[in-house]
């Protein structure tokens, strides 16, 4: 993998994926005229139609896209060109059936959707390289092309193919050296799983051991990183220095590690899909519609914060909702104003591009009811008008957000290893069954607490936190939360301890410090490494089916509705002070949360998955002050404020009203509204209409 120069965006790109080839008639010029009128500055093309680029093996048709690129350039619309490797043509799967991915050993995925191939297979890579070179070689010099998207949402499948498994074993040999080491590290004495030779390692289909599964998931993520890095290197042979290379990450996918994957790219790009309508009403609690969409305002912000976390840099949104996104039985178009709110919510957390999926709603195929900017009639309607208003606002903002860096009052530690481990061994359940989304549920409980407390979150991968070091972490982030940091090496837990000693306030969630780097339960008193500095330990833990009320103690005040959910650690204080307790005949014997000074800082241990009110109360108690207090300390939900710094030291502020009722916020500093073209003095009471956003720049 070669070093890829980072992409430094200017302005906020705005547009949609555009598939002229999906139309039933030629309307390229009409479409692009409408896009120009809507303020579009970018489109993404070409990534879904390998069979158009290469209709028969070795016969390429490359000119069909030229009218789109020429027409875009004539209108000043930039283009992101995609490589078509995620959707293989019929001739390829028929002539080379061995490239089919296997979800279980010997069971090829039937062809007829997309991403059915094992992209580590040499035969697939041969044909993929050929079409990549043809497409990129043809259009790299076109003046409209500003960058490339290689593949599309990689990591959908875990490959059980023979070749993939053989390469997995070879990598284990390099990592562990000999079978005795593997037997010891994985605990293969259990149930007579010890192996005497590498040839005895069984296939993953029937595997029951979490250590094996974690190694398997790490390996599958490596395959994805290697595939995308390989494509990036090929594209870089043709790309100009000012053209970026990325892929669009679907973060819930099984087989990628976004930290390593994004390191091979010029810029992170991703596809945050979210539930709309009442799902964005902060007064309501609604379940997610799908496993790949979030619910709630905090869920939308968490997706943006995850995108920023991959490189700790501004990012591109390559796909997001324009209308309803899902199958034919799930139709929830946005309330008026919600599209603008979502766009600026993403921008306020670091997005340098907003692209909708997609321009026009397709009249056929699996995604017939995945709504685009234009409906099936292709006549501009309400959504087009709202999108146009966003485009007009971005045109007025111009390059004012160049160099923008979102604020982070509270850092939260993210662990892909723990997410994978919890998908195999979930600690939580739903409807009486283990919940593979346990990690996200625990993490989101704390992330939402940050948002509801009026603060802003910065998500850090464990590796990024280690690279910063304890002193720098404490300097940047007064509060650091480790929710469910289960798969953790000693040095990572020591970093958390040292962060508190350096002056930070560490908040420990359930399962943190319970496992080691191999996902083995530590043979130690929990929470390992952190027990002594935190002044607390526990011996037992329990799932709970119903919320249990929690009340505050001492200087910690919790709302009357605060509750523990899902899980309880039986915390036993040593030198820690209880700050919250359960109202329960048995669990009342244990504190719900305890705190203890450590060095120049503090460690607070939360022994449950806090409900939104409890989580927000903990964050508000732990955080000295939020950045948004500098603008509007009297704000309250349904209003949220996001902010970030500009290179000249000023701040940009984004004010959101997530409700049907008009809200008012009094600001304490002079600002300018670049969209309305107005200036506001300190002390001004600003009206925020229902489902709307206001953008302010320090005056």
Image (tube, helix red, strand yellow):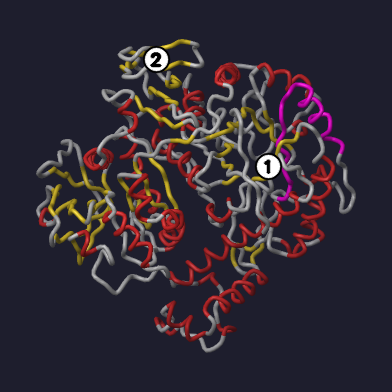
Q: Where does the C terminus fall, quadrant-wise?
A: top left
Residue reaching furthest right?
A: 59
x, y percent for residue 491: 38, 65
Q: Give whichever of 609, 288 is nearer the camera.
A: 609
Is 368 situated left or right of 441 in this image? right
Q: Is residue 574 magenta?
A: no
Image: magenta residue range: 63-85
x, y percent for residue 654: 43, 25
Residue drawn at x 44%, y 77% as measured from the top left: 186
Q: Give whichever of 286, 490 is nearer the camera.
A: 490
Q: Secondary structure at mark 1?
A: strand
Viewer can see residue 648: yes
Displayed quadrant of residue 37: top right
Is 624 situated left or right of 344 in this image? left
Question: For the residues carrying marks 1 and 2, which lies nearer the camera in this image?
Answer: 1
Residue reaching furthest bottom?
A: 196
Is 662 situated left or right of 614 in this image? right
* Residues at circles 1 and 2 in contact by the CB criterion of under 8 Å: no
> Mark 2 packing: few (<14 Cα in 10 Å), some, or many (20+)?
some
Viewer can see residue 247: no
> Mark 1 packing: few (<14 Cα in 10 Å), some, or many (20+)?
many
For disc 1, the marked residue is: 244
Residue reaching furthest top?
A: 678
Displayed quadrant of residue 525: bottom left
Q: Secondary structure at mark 2?
A: loop
x, y percent for residue 341: 47, 25
For disc 2, the marked residue is: 689
Q: Where does the N terminus fall, quadrant-wise?
A: bottom right
Q: CA distance from mark 1 to mark 2?
A: 38 Å
Is 584 situated left or right of 620 in this image? left
Q: Is residue 699 above or below residue 122?
A: above
Residue drawn at x 67%, y 26% as measured from the top left: 41
């Amino acid at each position: 993998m070669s070093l890829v120069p980072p992409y430094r965006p200017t302005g906020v790109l705005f547009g949609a994926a555009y598939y002229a080839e999906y139309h039933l008639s030629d309307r390229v010029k009409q479409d692009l005229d409408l896009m120009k009128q809507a303020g579009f500055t970018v489109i993404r093309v070409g990534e879904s139609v390998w069979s158009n680029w290469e209709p028969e093996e070795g016969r390429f048709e490359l000119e069909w896209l030229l009218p789109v690129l020429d027409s875009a350039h004539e209108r000043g619309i930039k283009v992101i060109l995609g490589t078509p490797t995620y959707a293989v043509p019929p001739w390829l799967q028929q002539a080379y059936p061995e490239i089919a991915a296997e979800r279980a050993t010997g069971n090829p995925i039937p062809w007829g959707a997309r991403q059915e191939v094992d992209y580590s297979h040499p035969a697939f890579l041969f044909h993929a390289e050929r079409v990549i070179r043809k497409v990129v070689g043809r259009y790299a010099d076109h003046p409209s092309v500003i960058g490339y998207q290689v593949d599309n949402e990689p990591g959908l499948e875990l490959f059980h193919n023979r070749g993939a498994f053989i390469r997995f074993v070879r990598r284990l040999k390099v990592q562990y050296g000999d079978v005795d080491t593997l037997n010891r590290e994985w605990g293969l004495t259990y149930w007579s799983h010890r192996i005497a030779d590498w040839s005895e390692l069984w296939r993953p289909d029937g595997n029951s051991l979490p250590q094996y599964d974690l190694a398997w998931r790490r390996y599958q993520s490596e395959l994805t990183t290697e595939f995308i890095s390989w494509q990036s290197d090929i594209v870089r042979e043709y790309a100009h220095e000012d053209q970026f290379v990325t892929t669009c990450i679907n973060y819930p996918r099984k087989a990628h590690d976004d930290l390593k994957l994004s390191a091979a790219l010029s810029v992170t790009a991703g596809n945050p899909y979210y539930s709309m309508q009442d799902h964005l009403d902060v007064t309501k609690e609604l379940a997610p519609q799908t496993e790949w969409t979030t619910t709630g305002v905090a869920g939308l912000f968490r997706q943006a914060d995850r995108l920023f976390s991959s490189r700790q840099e501004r990012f591109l949104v390559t796909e997001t909702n324009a209308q309803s996104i899902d199958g034919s039985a799930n139709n929830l178009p946005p309330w008026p104003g919600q599209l603008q709110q979502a766009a600026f919510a993403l921008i306020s957390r670091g997005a340098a591009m907003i692209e909708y999926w997609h321009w026009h709603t397709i009249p056929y195929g699996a995604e017939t009811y995945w709504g685009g900017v234009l409906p099936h009639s292709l006549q501009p309607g309400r959504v087009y008008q709202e999108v146009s208003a966003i485009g007009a606002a971005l045109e007025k903002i111009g390059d004012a957000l160049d160099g923008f860096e979102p604020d982070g009052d509270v850092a939260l530690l993210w662990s892909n290893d723990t997410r994978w481990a919890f998908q195999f061994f979930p600690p939580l359940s739903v409807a009486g069954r283990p919940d593979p989304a346990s990690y996200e549920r625990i993490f989101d409980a704390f992330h939402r607490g940050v948002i509801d407390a009026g603060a802003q979150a910065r998500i850090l991968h464990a590796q990024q936190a280690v690279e910063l070091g304890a002193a720098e972490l404490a300097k940047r982030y007064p509060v650091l939360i480790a929710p469910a940091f289960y798969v953790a090496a000693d040095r990572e837990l020591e970093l958390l301890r040292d962060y508190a000693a350096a002056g930070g306030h560490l908040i420990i969630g359930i399962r943190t410090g319970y496992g080691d780097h191999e996902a083995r339960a530590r043979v130690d008193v929990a929470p390992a490494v952190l027990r002594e500095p935190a002044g607390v330990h526990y011996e037992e833990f329990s799932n709970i089916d119903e919320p249990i009320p929690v009340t505050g103690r001492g200087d910690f005040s919790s709302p009357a509705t605060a509750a523990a959910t899902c899980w309880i650690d039986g915390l036993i204080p040593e030198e820690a002070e209880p700050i919250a307790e359960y109202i329960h005949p048995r669990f009342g014997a244990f504190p719900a949360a305890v705190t203890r000074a450590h060095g120049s800082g503090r460690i607070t241990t939360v022994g449950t998955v806090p409900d939104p009110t409890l989580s927000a109360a903990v964050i508000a108690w732990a955080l000295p002050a939020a950045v948004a207090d500098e603008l509007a300390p009297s704000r309250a939900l349904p209003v949220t404020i996001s902010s970030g710094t500009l290179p000249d030291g000023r701040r940009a502020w984004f004010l959101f009203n997530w409700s049907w009722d008009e809200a008012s916020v009094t600001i304490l500093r002079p600002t300018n509204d670049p969209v309305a073209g107005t200036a506001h003095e300190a002390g001004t009471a600003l009206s925020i209409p229902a489902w709307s956003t206001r953008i302010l720049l320090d005056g």
